[in-house]
Image (cartoon, helix red, strand yellow):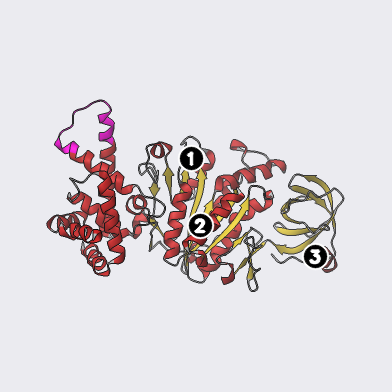
Amino acid sequence: MKIKDFDYYLDKIGEIGFVEESVYCLTYISGLPNIHLGEVVIFESGDLGYTLSLNRDQVLVLLLTETRIKVGSKAVRTGENIKAPVGNEVLGRLIDPLGRVKDYGKPFLSFELKPVDVSPPNITQRKQVEKPLETGVTIVDLVIPLAKGQRELVIGDRKTGKTEFLLHTLLTQALKGTVCIYAVIGQKQIDINKLYEFFEAKGIRKNTLIVASSSSDPAGQIFLTPYTAMTIAEFYKDKGMDVLLILDDMTTHARMYREISLLAKRFPGRASYPGDIFYIHAKLIERAGNFNKGSITCLPVAEAILGDLSGYLQTNLMAMTDGHIFFDTDFFNQGKRPAINPFLSVTRVGHQVQSMLQKDISRELSSFLVGYERMKQFLHFGAEVGDTARRTLALGAKIDVFFNQSINASIPLNANIFILSALWSGVWNETDEIRLRQEMEQVVLVYQTDDTFKKQIDDLLNSAKTFSEVVNYLRRNTELITGKIVRSKV
């Protein structure tokens, strides 16, 4: 934001107000008859505020700075709303919700200013999702696929791997040239610094941006963080670009809004949240989507408590998104990485952008995972298993190895399909889990480095219509896999 000093607006507008009451991050001001909602107010101390509500005698202003405003202080309205800087210079930087540079780099020289609180685009500006969004995370790309323009909630208990998944997805998309924006809402400063260092270490700063507020920042700045990030995302979307936007996390945002509302003496609703909490979140998230020109894929994050998905805030966010990815504490404790529960995760539009082969694989794999999980439950009772069940359990154990991956292992979708087909064909039936992991990594490496092999696999998968076609082909041509494993050892 470019705001001039107190005297400038006093001379320009000629209205002056006085602080009647100051409560933590809120002030009540009298004497500004023509002020409107969302207008920025500047105090004689130079501090800024944001107009939250109006009544007959007073204006309620949310402070955007740490300073406690004294009763009797003077204030003037600016005639301007909160605006965020947008432009090519913004990429690669770390900024706060007011657009101020926080990475010790040079300030922006050329940029536009756009209001952060606007209405979502109407239906005539939108279109159906058309392109897949690769996350590089095997279980998501195969079982819970995402599309560009989708709003997908990422939910789970604390410390279950949500951030690792988000960084994995962001890294995959940034390397493909997608503009990636990460909104850090009220988190520790050390976590913000680590995020910036991660982008720098991976060499993806040129097309990423961090909009961050720390837990020590004023409530007003924390509240504005996702709005600033969404506004910058809309700028690149309007240029016809695909944008990935991560809002981490909306639970903190809701708690901060609840705190502001209770201090403002608004009537509390369920769990003491204000009655308009659904509206403000829905209005924000609806600004993402697939449009006639560009797309914004939004991944809002929510914290679950003890794996409970039925909380008020959690169900609100589920209702306004196109699905959710659930990080399960039990899966995490079993050593699964990522700890995504495919049975409680949903993608409502992701399957629309899949090819016939990918849809067939998703159906087959989902069905198998359900049967495999049920069979594991029977084993707890000491049930005897036949040959069919034994084969299912053996394949399931190998698929568990296949799904486990670190943040540094981003696997292309076709490589994932090829390895899954090889597992299904029985090529690795006699291979132990440790050796299996090594050989799968070798296949991925050859796929990424050998153009001839990559073309051969891509042609095979592009021509196949069903999963069984690929599996049967690999059963007849096992050397396609074993030959590459041997060659990569040499």
Which residue has dot 2 on it? 198
Residue 289 location in percent, x, y? Answer: 47, 60
* Mark linked to residue 5: 3
Upstream in the sequence, badge 3 or badge 1?
A: 3
Quarter containing the N terminus? bottom right
* Mark linked to residue 114: none
Q: CA distance from mark 1 to mark 2?
A: 23 Å
Q: Residue furthest front?
A: 490
Quarter containing the C terminus? bottom left
Judging from the image, what secondary structure is the residue with disc 3 in? Answer: loop
Residue 222 location in percent, x, y? Answer: 64, 51
- As rendered, which of 215 and 323 lies closer to the eye? 215
Residue 45 location in percent, x, y? Answer: 82, 57
Amino acid type, residue under disc 1 in the picture = Asp
Residue 185 location in percent, x, y? Answer: 59, 51
User: In the picture shown, does residue 221 fall above or below 109?
Assistant: above
Which residue has dot 1 on it? 157
Q: Write down the quadrant of residue 82 in the picture.
A: bottom right
Q: Which residues are magenta?
A: 374-390
Q: CA distance from mark 3 to mark 1?
A: 45 Å
User: In the picture shown, does residue 200 fall above or below 424?
Assistant: below
